[in-house]
Image (cartoon, helix red, strand yellow):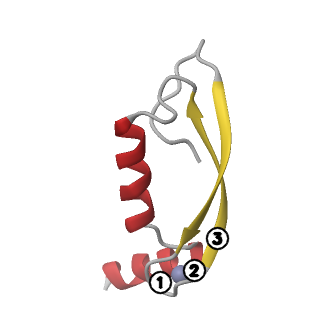
Amino acid sequence: MIIGKIGKNEKKIKFHLDITCMTCKKTVPGGMQASENYFGSDSFKIEIDNFKKNYLCGICRDKKRLADKQ
Ligand SMILES: [Zn+2]
């Protein structure tokens, strides 16, 4: 998963993030990427925070998608 935008000529930083599903509380290890410039910046931290707050694992995302349809 990519956090923020990575420009064509920008170096990528790969990092690991343990994310917890908001619904079933399952922890999912995520392989993440961000551009070198963005990594560690304030907006990066905010985006990571928001990402964690809204994260749903694949199963819960599917369930939500089905529920939204009805
Ligand atoms: Zn879940």
Residue under the image location 50 percent in, 80 percent down: 60
- Position of 68 with respect to 35 (left or right) is left
Q: Which residue is mark 2?
A: 59
Front residue of 60 and 15: 15
Residue under the image location 41 percent in, 75 percent down: 65
Mark 1 belongs to which amino acid?
A: Lys
Expressed as whole percent of the image width and height from the top left, the position of residue 15 reads 67, 45
Q: Which residue is mark 1?
A: 63
Expressed as whole percent of the image width and height from the top left, the position of residue 20 reads 53, 74
Q: Is residue 65 above or below residue 12?
A: below
Q: What crowding class fits label 3: few (fewer than 14 Cα within 10 Å), some (14-19), or many (20 or more)?
A: some
Instruction: Say what secondary structure mark 1 lies in.
Output: helix
Tell me whether the residue at label 3 lies in contact with that at label 2, contact meaning CB atoms closer than 8 angstroms. no
Residue under the image location 58 percent in, 72 percent down: 58
Instruction: Say what secondary structure mark 2 lies in.
Output: helix
Tell me whether the residue at label 1 lies in contact with that at label 2, contact meaning CB atoms closer than 8 angstroms. yes
Q: Which residue is mark 3?
A: 28
Toward the top, the furthest residue is 9
Mark 2 belongs to which amino acid?
A: Ile
**The C terminus appears in which quarter of the rendering?**
bottom left
Expressed as whole percent of the image width and height from the top left, the position of residue 24 reads 51, 87
Single out the mark in the foreground, 1 or 3: 3
Q: Is mark 2 within 8 Å of ligand 1?
A: yes
